[in-house]
């Protein structure tokens, strides 16, 4: 019988997993881009980004683009490891 790894509950959320999947392939992404790609509401996305940031999986920087606020997210080394561990754990369930 295979030894199943525990899936990271933080990444097991559909929206948080989608965010991590987007960020793993880019240096950084703007809030609006992430919101559009995930088809989430701004409020829900903000809450989920905060959870990922608190866990140390992503970094969030706030600045301005002209006079408009600009929020940019990037995945951290810890986030990359957590994502890779999550994917490997999933592979254990399907192999």
Image (spheres, rainbow, N blue to C red):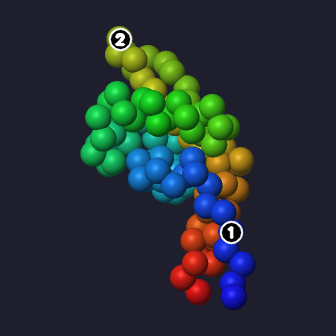
In front of the other: 54 or 67: 54
State left or right for residue 14 relative to residue 20. Answer: left
Check disc 2 and report its element: helix, strand or loop.
Answer: loop
Q: Position of residue 26 (x, y in %)?
A: 51, 51
- Seen from the viewer's position, the closer of residues 26 and 42 is 42
The quarter of the picture where residue 57 lies is top right
Residue 67: give its label. 2
Q: Residue at x 59, y 86 (%)?
A: 95
Residue at 63% over, 70% down: 89
- Seen in the picture, residue 84 relative to 50 is either above or below; the reply is below
Please, is residue 48 above or below residue 92 in the view?
above
Count neighbours of disc 2 (C-alpha within 10 A) and say few if under 14, some if 14 to 19, many if 20 or more: few
Residue at 55% across / 34% down in the picture?
51
Quadrant in which the N terminus appears: bottom right
Q: Position of residue 82 (x, y in %)?
A: 66, 54
Separation of marks 1 and 2 at Cα, in angstroms: 47 Å
Q: Is residue 23 above or below residue 49?
A: below
Please tell me which residue lies in front, 26 or 53.
Answer: 53
Residue sticking out furthest to the top: 67
| Helix, strand or loop under label 1 | loop
Task: Say whether residue 22 is visible.
Answer: no
The numbered disc on residue 5 is: 1
User: How dense is the environment of label 1, judged by Cα within 10 Å: few (below 14), some, or many (20 and up)?
Assistant: some
Q: In this image, 46 relative to 1: left or right?
A: left
Q: Nearer the viewer, mark 1 or mark 2?
A: 1
Image quarter of residue 92: bottom right
Provide residue 70's location: percent of width, then percent of height.
Answer: 42, 23
Q: Where in the figure is residue 50, as x and y percent of width and height?
A: 53, 30
Return the disc, 1 or 2, that comes first in the chain's sequence.
1
């Amino acid at each position: 019988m295979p030894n199943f790894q525990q899936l990271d509950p933080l990444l097991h959320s559909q929206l948080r997993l989608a965010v991590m999947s987007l960020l793993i392939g880019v240096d950084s992404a703007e809030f609006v881009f992430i919101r559009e790609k995930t088809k989430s509401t701004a409020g829900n996305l903000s809450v989920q980004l905060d959870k990922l940031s608190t866990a140390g999986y992503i970094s969030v920087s706030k600045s301005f683009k002209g006079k408009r606020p600009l929020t940019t997210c990037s995945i951290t080394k810890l986030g990359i490891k957590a994502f890779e561990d999550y994917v490997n754990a999933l592979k254990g369930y399907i192999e």
